[in-house]
Amino acid sequence: MAKKQKKPKKPSQVWKLYDSKDKLARKNASCPKCGPGCFMAAHKDRVSCGKCGYSEMSKKQ
């Protein structure tokens, strides 16, 4: 049987989650369930955690 070819892994782009002008600051909020090490993803209508699945809906404007 032929072996499957492995797809190359994309590097995690963690540096895009930080803002470093004068001091190092986080751009996104951290998850209240997972703690300060896990970021929440900002979507159009909500923010959600990719680790535990916690999500908060944003207010309608």
Image (cartoon, rainbow, N blue to C red):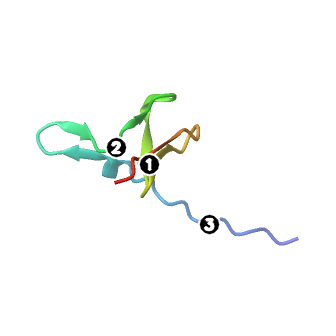
Mark sitting earlier along the chain (1/2): 2
Q: What is the x, y in percent for residue 58?
A: 41, 47
Q: Residue at x 15, y 36 (%)?
A: 23
Amino acid type shown at disc 1: Ala
- Which disc is residue 28 wearing? 2
Q: Residue furthest right?
A: 1
Q: Are marks 1 and 2 in contact (CB under 8 Å)?
A: yes
- Which disc is residue 41 wearing? 1
Q: What is the x, y in percent for residue 24?
A: 21, 38
Bin the neighbour count of mark 2 within 10 Å (Cα to Cα): few under 14, some 14-19, many 20 and up: some
Quadrant where the C terminus sits is: bottom left
Q: What is the x, y in percent for residue 13?
A: 39, 53
Mark sitting earlier along the chain (2/3): 3
Quadrant where the N terminus sits is: bottom right
Mark 2 or 3, closer to the camera: 2
Mark sitting earlier along the chain (3/1): 3
In terms of depth relative to the viewer, which is nearer, 18 or 2?
18
